[in-house]
């Protein structure tokens, strides 16, 4: 069975932290593909992303060149609707669409959603969280400053959690069998989905910090994939994040 992970985010800009967690997940779970899907508007991120979707998608496609398992995806691209132009994209709808697309293909697919611990700790606030959590299995990457120990408490009350016994760390796993998961989520419709933690990641990088540095004219090539830093240097898109992007 093919294994695919959906990896959503602002990717404003995509950085080495994103590549590190996607690589770790692809290695640990023998993923065939990681779909890097920049989101149009994220309901919980206020005004951000300030950078035009086309720039973020282009940078994500450039970053995804780092590994043949990585693919840029337009699944979470702007979905303007005639009656409500301000409606954000909701991950529950994006994942439901992805599941339907995959179900129509001849080869069966195991679908995972990959996200960082900061995003997971907020999952109870995501739109239709109980339904969302039933749609895929979940891979949660550790992130400095965010405690995986609080992962269960983040879940909405409708979801019943079972802690699974885990004999060894998922990060050491290399065969094609899945490692034992950390949590099993039981849903109202009697289905279950699984959650794995990648506890060993320590990528102390954030796009917010990178944007602040870029706004001061500093491009930190250590923290950005090379084609992304070249693109930023050529276009000057972060020269002032308070101005409208040049593609608008
Ligand atoms: P921002 O600082 O703008 O909020 P970000 O660096 O968190 O951005 P996003 O594009 O919002 O990047 O992140 C996409 C996904 O990658 C999210 O699930 C986030 O939790 C995860 N992620 C981003 N950076 C890291 C990191 N350094 N370690 C672990 N997970 C990360």
Image: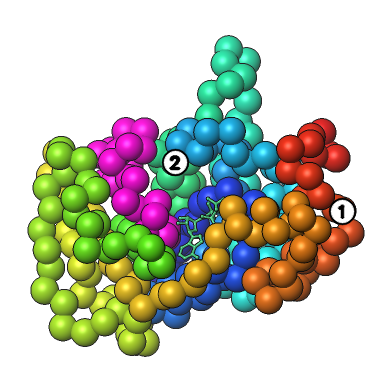
Check the image and name the residue furthest to the top.
Answer: 83
248 or 192: nearer the viewer: 248
Q: Quadrant of residue 29?
A: bottom left
Q: Residue at x 62, y 76 (%)?
A: 67
Q: Which residues are magenta?
A: 111-136
Let me know if residue 189 appears in the view: no
Which label sits on residue 84? none
Q: Residue at x 22, y 57 (%)?
A: 150
In this rendering, which labeled residue sits more in front, label 1 or label 2?
1
Is 107 magenta? The answer is no
Left or right, residue 26 beside residue 160: right
Left or right, residue 203 beside residue 51: left
Q: Residue at x 15, y 38 (%)?
A: 158
How crowded is the residue under tag 2: few (<14 C-alpha within 10 Å), some, or many (20+)? many
Q: CA distance from mark 1 to mark 2?
A: 30 Å
Pick the quarter of the image with the C terminus. top right
Residue 183 position within the rendered picture, expressed as x and y whole percent measured from the top left:
18, 62
Residue 118 position within the rendered picture, expressed as x and y whole percent measured from the top left:
39, 55
Q: Quadrant of residue 193?
A: bottom left
Pick the quarter of the image with the N terminus. bottom left
Tag 1 residue: 235
Q: Is mark 2 within 8 Å of ligand 1?
A: no
Residue 226 position within the rendered picture, expressed as x and y whole percent measured from the top left:
75, 73
């Amino acid at each position: 069975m093919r294994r695919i992970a959906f990896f959503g985010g602002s990717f404003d800009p995509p950085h080495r932290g994103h590549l590190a967690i996607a690589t770790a997940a692809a290695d640990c779970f023998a993923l065939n593909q990681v779909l890097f899907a920049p989101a149009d508007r994220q309901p919980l991120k206020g005004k951000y992303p300030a950078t035009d979707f086309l720039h973020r998608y282009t940078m994500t496609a450039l970053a995804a060149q780092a590994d043949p398992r990585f693919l840029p995806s337009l699944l979470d691209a702007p979905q303007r609707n005639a009656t409500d132009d301000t409606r954000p994209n909701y991950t529950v709808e994006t994942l439901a669409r992805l599941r339907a697309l995959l179900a129509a293909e001849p080869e069966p697919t195991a679908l995972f959603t990959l996200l960082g611990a900061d995003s997971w700790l907020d999952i109870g606030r995501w739109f239709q969280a109980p339904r969302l959590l039933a749609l895929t299995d979940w891979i949660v990457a550790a992130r400095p400053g965010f405690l995986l120990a609080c992962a269960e408490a983040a879940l909405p009350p409708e979801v019943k959690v079972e802690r699974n016994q885990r004999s060894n760390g998922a990060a050491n796993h290399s065969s094609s069998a899945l490692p034992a998961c950390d949590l099993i989520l039981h849903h109202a419709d009697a289905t279950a989905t699984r959650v794995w933690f990648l506890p060993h990641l320590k990528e102390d990088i954030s796009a917010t910090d990178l944007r602040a540095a870029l706004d001061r004219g500093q491009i930190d090539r250590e923290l950005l994939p090379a084609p992304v830093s070249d693109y930023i240097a050529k276009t000057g898109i972060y020269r002032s994040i308070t101005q409208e992007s040049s593609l608008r």
